[in-house]
Amino acid sequence: MLRGITTITLFADDVDAARDWYTEVLGAEAYFARDVDGRLAYTEFRVGDYQHELGIIDRRYAPAAGVAPGGVVVYWAVDDVAAAHARLLGLGAAEHGPLTERGPGFVTASVVDPFGNVVGVMENAHYDEVLASMRG
C-alpha cells in the first residue's frame, strides 16, 4: 500500500522567508515555486540521496483541523547528528529534542524551525545499509 515518501510539507506564514532559510539549511535552491495572488504560496526542494520533495506551503492552506508540532517528527538522515543539530540551532531553530542515542547506530535530535515546524535529524544504520545495497 505505502510505496514511499513523495512530499514532506511544512507550513509557514512567510513562505519567502522559509524558502530562504531552507535554502541556507540545504545549500540548494528551490526548484519549484507557485504564486497565488502575487504572493509565494508554495515552493519545493529536492533533498538527499533519494531526492525526496520538501514543500513549504503558505499556512493559509493548512488543513482546517490545523497542524500542530509534536504529532509527527520526520527524521532526515545525516552523517553527524551533533553537527547538524548545532548548525540548525545556529541558524535560528529552537531546541525540540536533544541528542539521544536510541541504540547502536541510531542517534536522533530535533528542532523547531523559525516557522513552527518540527525537523528531526538522525544517524541511522538501517538507512546507510539500504542506501549501500541500492548502490550495489
Image (cartoon, rainbow, N blue to C red):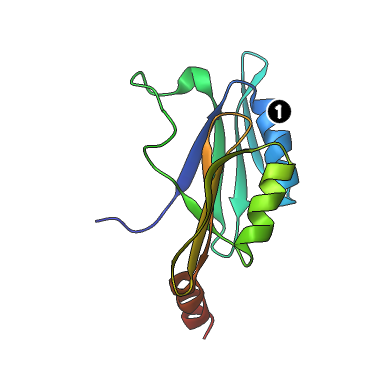
Question: How dense is the environment of label 1, judged by Cα within 10 Å: few (below 14), some, or many (20 and up)?
Answer: few
Q: Residue furthest top?
A: 37
Residue 39: quadrant of the picture: top right
Residue at image mark 1 = 17
Give whichever of 49, 74 is nearer the camera.
74
Viewer can see residue 83: yes
Q: Secondary structure at mark 1?
A: helix
Give whichever of 110, 40 is nearer the camera.
110
Q: Residue furthest left?
A: 1
Looking at the picture, how far across and down is residue 109, in whole percent?
53, 53
Report the quarter where the N terminus lies: bottom left
Residue name at image x 44 percent, y 33 percent? 69
Give whichever of 6, 105 is nearer the camera.
105
Looking at the picture, how far across and down is residue 36, in whole percent?
59, 18
Residue name at image x 57 percent, y 42 percent? 111
Residue name at image x 70 percent, y 36 percent? 92
Q: Is residue 9 above or below residue 115?
A: below
Looking at the picture, how far across and down is residue 10, in whole percent?
52, 35
Q: Is residue 60 above or below residue 48?
A: above
Amino acid carrying mark 1 in the image: Ala
Looking at the picture, how far across and down is residue 118, in whole percent?
51, 39
Residue name at image x 41 percent, y 37 percent? 70
Give whichever of 5, 88 is nearer the camera.
88
Is 15 left, or right, of 107 in this rendering? right
Q: Is residue 56 above or below residue 45?
A: above
Q: Is residue 127 above or below residue 84?
A: below
Viewer can see residue 120: no
Question: How many marks do you count on the picture?
Answer: 1
